[in-house]
Image (cartoon, rainbow, N blue to C red):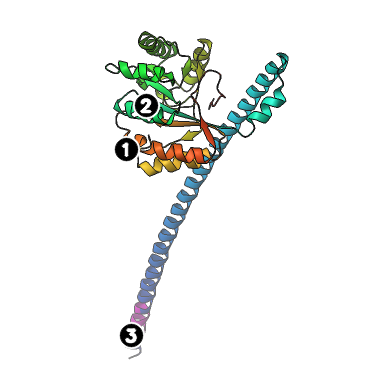
Amino acid sequence: MAKRNNQIGITILLIALSLGLFAGTGFLASKSSGGKEALTKAQEELTTVEASKANLELQVQELATKNEQLLKQIEELNIQIQELEKQGVDVSVITEEQEDRKVAYLTFDDGPSANTAKILDFLKVNQIRATFFVLEKDGYDDLYKRIVDEGHSIAIHSSTHDYAEIYQNVDNFMADVQSLSNHIKDLTGVETKVLRFPGGSNNTVSHRYGGNDIMDKIIPAVTQAGYVYYDWNVDSQDAAKGLQDTQVIVNSVLNQAKYNDNAVILMHDAAAKTTTVEALPQIVEGLKQQGFVFEALSTESEPVKFK
C-alpha cells in the first residue's frame, strides 16, 4: 500500500513538473513575441529619426549654399561700388534711388516652341522684357528673331541639352555652347554672352558623366570664354512634373518672390509646358502688386549664382 502511495505521489509530482514546464514555455514564448514587437517598433522609430536627420542635413546644406551665394553677391556689389567711386560717381545718390527698387527677371528655359510664341504675344501686350535661355532647334527661326526684335534677351542654355554628352568633359560642353552661339548669331546677329547651365551651376547629375568635380572645371572655362552665367532664386516648379498645375506655378513664384528684391524666376517654355503660359498673367499681376518692375538679364545684371 505504501509502495502504491509512493507511485501515486511520484506521478503527481511529474504531472506538476510538466505543467510548470509548459507554463514556463508559454511565458517565454509570450515574452519573446513581445520582444520582437518592441524591437520592430524601435527599428521603425530609428528609421524615422534617420530620415528626419537626413532631411535636416539637406536643409542645412541648402541654407549654407544660399548664405554663400549672398556673401558672393555682397562682395561683388562692394567691388562695383568701389569702381564707381573711382570714376567719381556719387554712390550715395544711386543707393537712395535703388533702395526700394524691386526687379523681377522672367526667364524661360528649353525653348523655342509654340509656347514661346504665346509668351511673346503676352509680353508684347504688357510691354515686359524677359530672358529666353534657348536650345538649338530647327524650324523656329522666326521665334529666335522675335525674341531679339521685340527687345528680349536671348541667352545660351544648350545646343542639345544632352547631359550625358555635354557633361562628359570641358571640351564637350564648350563645343555645345559654341554650336548654339553660332546658331543664334547666324539667325539674329546677336553674339550673346548670357548663359544658364542645364540643371544649374550646382547640379549633381553631371557627376555621373564627368565626375564630382566636372562643374568646377566647366565654370572657369565658361567664365574665361567671356560668358556670364545666371542661376535662379525663384523656382516656379513648372518642371517638378510633366504638366504642373497652373496654380502651383503661380503660388510658387509669388510666395518665393516676396523674399527676393532681385528675383530671377525659373520657368520653362518647352512644348509640354502649357500651364506655364496659363500661369503667366497671374504671375505678372501678382509681382506688380508686390512692387516689382520687369527687366531682361544682361551681363551687367545683379548676379544670382549657386556657385
Q: Quadrant of the C terminus?
A: top right
Could you tell me which residue is drawn at 37 percent across and 69 percent down? Answer: 26
Closer to the observer: label 3 or label 1? 1
Is the residue under label 2 in contact with that under label 1 (CB below 8 Å)? no
Q: Residues within 10 Å of mark 3 (few under 14, many from 20)?
A: few
Indicate which disc, 1 or 2, sits on the residue closer to the N terminus: 2
Indicate which disc, 3 or 2, sits on the residue closer to the N terminus: 3
- Judging by the rendered image, the residue that carries numbered circle 3 is 8
- Judging by the rendered image, the residue that carries numbered circle 2 is 120
Q: Above or below — where is 191 with respect to 250? A: above
- The three-letter code of the residue at mark 2 reads Leu
Which of the 4 quarters of the picture holds residue 92?
A: top right
Residue 296's disc is none
Number of marks in picture:
3
- Label 3: element kind: helix
Residue 11 painted magenta = yes
- Label 1: element kind: loop
The secondary structure that most of the magenta stretch takes on is helix
Q: Above or below — where is 266 with respect to 46? A: above
Query: Where is residue 22 shown, x and y percent of the image?
Result: 35, 72
- Judging by the rendered image, the residue that carries numbered circle 1 is 243
Residue range in magenta is: 7-15
Q: Above or below — where is 44 with respect to 137? A: below
7 and 106: which is toward the camera: 106
